[in-house]
Amino acid sequence: MEYVELKIRPGDRWFHEFDELVAADPELCHGPIHHINLLSDDTMVVLYEIYGPKERVDALHAEHDHPAETAHLGDDTLVYTHHDPSDVAYDLLTVANEHSVVVDTPIEFSDDDELQVRLIGTAESLQSAFGAAPEGAQVTVEKTGEYRPGTERLFTDLTDRQRETLLTALEMGYYDNPRRATYSDIADELDCTATTVGEHLRKIEGYVLREIAPRHWGRTR
């Protein structure tokens, strides 16, 4: 099974006018879209997060007459909406259905408010779906490869040498508490320098932490 990661920006920049309101609000930030479905009547239901207080999200919905169900999710907000999709959103979901590909979730917003979408399917179905991408959107391929779910994908994204270094560090107890191995111990096992081990592990840690941290973490710095 293959996957392709895309960045998608509609021609008018936003998939829904409420997206623009969230992006412009200093208290709010786009969170992940957890579920999205196109119904038989061509309306759409979406379950997604907004990073920011529920009270502000509710006020924004009320100010602009956008009905939605919301719930507290820690300090952030879980939102359920049922509405008519934009042309681009409708075309995207229709393409996925017609070409037998899976739209993986969560769907994330990038730092410049493009949608980051992962499609899963056979090589042939992905190629045909990409060829039928909505005309009203700018679509960029970010990454392709063999699909692995969840945390397994993080591991397969590492280089061969990084994977070897990480597994050796785990086996030797580098991440145990108390720590049972040093960079030098791992380096002796891998026949490389302690500096090289440190570089590999720091790159791995940085990559994994950035992947699991919410996108709005930088706003609290």
Image (cartoon, rainbow, N blue to C red):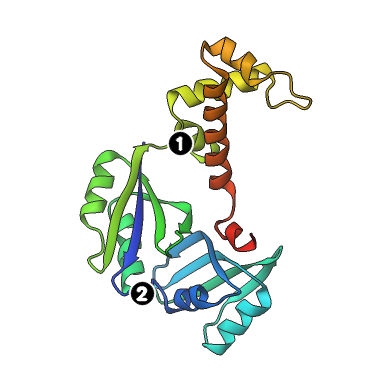
Residue drawn at x 47%, y 57% is: 108
In the image, 91 versus 158, the foreground residue is: 158
Question: How many numbered discs?
Answer: 2
Q: Residue at x 49, y 39 (%)?
A: 149
Quick check: 173 above or below 217?
A: above
Q: Residues within 10 Å of mark 1 (few under 14, many from 20)?
A: some
Tag 2: Cα neighbours inside 10 Å, few (<14), some, or many (≥20)?
some
- The amino acid marked with disc number 1 is Arg
Which residue is at 27% across, 45% downward? Answer: 125
* SS at mark 2 in the image: loop
Which residue was labeled with disc 2? 86
Q: Left or right: where does residue 100 sit relative to residue 164? A: left
Image spot of residue 46 (x, y percent): 50, 67
Check the image and name the residue furthest to the right: 178
* Amino acid on which disc 2 is placed: Ser
Which numbered tag is attached to residue 113? Answer: none
Q: Pinpoint residue 170: horizontal percent, then vertical percent.
A: 64, 22
Between 103 and 4, which is closer to the camera in this rendering?
4
Q: CA distance from mark 1 to mark 2?
A: 31 Å
For the C terminus, the image quarter is bottom right
The residue indicated by pointer 1 is 148
In-front residue for pair 93/180 = 180
Q: Do the residues bearing badges 1 and 2 touch, measured as CB atoms within 8 Å?
A: no
Quarter of the picture containing the N terminus is top left
Q: Position of residue 24 (x, y in %)?
A: 50, 77
Give me the residue at 42% from left, 67% from top. Answer: 39
The vertical placement of 208 against 213, above or below, is above
N-term mark: 1 or 2: 2
Name the side, left or right, on which 205 lies relative to 135: right
Question: What secondary structure is marked by label 1?
Answer: loop
Image spot of residue 8 (x, y percent): 34, 60
